[in-house]
Image (cartoon, rainbow, N blue to C red):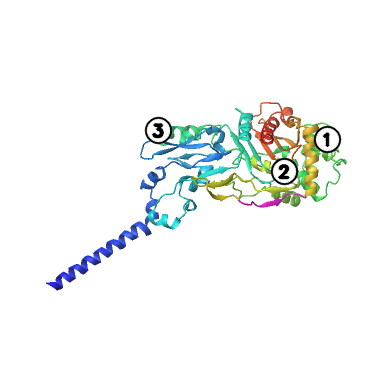
Amino acid sequence: MTKYMRHAAAFCALLMVALLVNAARVQVVQAPSYDGNTANRRSAIARYGQPRGDILVDGIPVTGSKDTGEQLRHERTYRNGPLYAPVTGFASQVYGTTFLEHAEDGILSGTDPMLSLFPLWNDVTRVRNRPGDVVTTLNRAAQEAAYRGLGVRKGAVAAVEPSTGRVLALVSTPSYDPAELSGNGDRVTSAWARLNDDPEQPMLNRAVRQTYPPGSTFKVVTAAAALDAGVVSDLDAPTDSPVPYKLPGTRTRLTNESDDCEDSSVRAAFEWSCNTVFAKLGVDVGLEAMASTAQAFGFNDTGLKIPFSVAPSTFDTQVDKAQLALSSIGQYNTRATPLQMAMVAAAVANGGQVRTPYLVERTVRRGGETVATTGSRPIRQAMNPATAVRMRELMTDVVREGTGANAAIPGATVGGKTGTAQHGIGNSGVPYAWFVSWAQRDDQLEPRVAVAVVVEDAAADRGDISGGGDAAPIAKAVMKAVLDS
């Protein structure tokens, strides 16, 4: 009898061990696969069981959370949603996350192990951290000025601090309210369908995800390349540039919107945006040097993140001389985001150095303790420092006595470049209005802001657009907001 009891006890112990092993296998080894299973709602319930962390601008939250009392308890809210949508993106219980809500989701949802003082213990106990906050680099006044300046027009604004790369403003219009997508149910589904079917594309972030032909604003790059290559040594010397200029190897004749461009000096041609002069300059510089300079400014960079990804701006490196001429005046296949053109202006303002732009200053725990900071960012030398000094001269002349007069700010030195970008079949579309600029207060040691503005549906004739009638006043308002901060 005792023998049978021993056997039964041993068998029971074996079963207990098997149960424990199986429980460990399910709860530890296979836990990640169960967590990721779409049929498992526990992770979603836990995710929305506590308020989401906030995104801050000038120390003030532009996001929030509300308790719905439902199973997915907390729903995302937004303050001035359309104003900050290109920065925050949305956090939807149905459609996921975008932009900062996506790039910093670990911090905002509380899943980032850096939020815990004892991450290994949290892994074992599966305790969820309190979400942290994301502190942005945005300047509230500049963001509001950009949004107000664009108004009902379609376009975008990007502003950066030249010496650091901090993104000060990032605006895209038309915009939308991310709160429309926060929850679940028919209301959210209907909003998603309406926003995606809207031909105006309000969810498109035109500041970083849309590329445009930069038009004459690209002449900043071409002039820098010509000065660095030694093709131009005297800004006031005649350039031997015929009008019209016949594109090499073709019968196509390039003309200008401005008069007095024939054999114009680089200074005068830059002030009045002579296409013939800069098309010929690009050819004289050559493809290799033009491409090298464009890439030093940031063109063809497919890995730029701020921390969400930025669409690459492009300068075609496999073109013939006629195509190079057009590329050098911001046409043909040359494309740029507003953020890229803000980087071009910033490089001129910063002695030729391009600072990699960034949007997140730091991430913090709910109590304010810093989790991580952005740290130093890569630097590229886009042009020689001496070239940058001369480019600042050229851009200052544009605002003082050229096509960018609408950007002038009393008590500050402002440099700028206007641009008109043709598009559509046979260039039939209303040209895009561009303006890139930088500004330095007279009582300060260095420029504080560089801006790029593009207006897609500029309600003006072509002369007004090339004269900075649409984009330059918006840039002025943004620069003034930063200088007055």
Mark 1 neighbour class, 10 Å CA radius: few under 14, some 14 to 19, many 20 or more: many
Q: Dividing the image into 4 quarters, which one contains the C terminus? A: top right
Q: Residue at x 28, y 64 (%)?
A: 18
Q: Residue at x 85, y 46 (%)?
A: 233
Q: Where residue 1 appears, x then y in whole percent?
A: 11, 72
According to the picture, the residue beneath numbered tag 1 turns out to be 261
Kindly report the distance in space between the C-alpha atoms of the residues bearing marks 1 and 3.
Answer: 60 Å
Secondary structure of the residue carrying tag 1 is loop
Q: Where residue 477 appears, x then y in whole percent?
A: 67, 31
Can the viewer see residue 246 in this picture? no
Which sits earlier in the primary sequence, circle 2 or circle 1? 1
Report the disc number at residue 186: 3
Identity of the amino acid at label 1?
Cys
Secondary structure of the residue carrying tag 3 is helix
- In this view of the protein, which residue sits in the foreground, 239 or 81? 81
Marks 2/3 in contact by CB < 8 Å: the verdict is: no
The chief SS type of the magenta part is loop
Which sits earlier in the primary sequence, circle 2 or circle 3? 3
Taking the image as shown, residue 479 lies to the left or right of residue 188, namely right
According to the picture, the residue beneath numbered tag 2 turns out to be 327
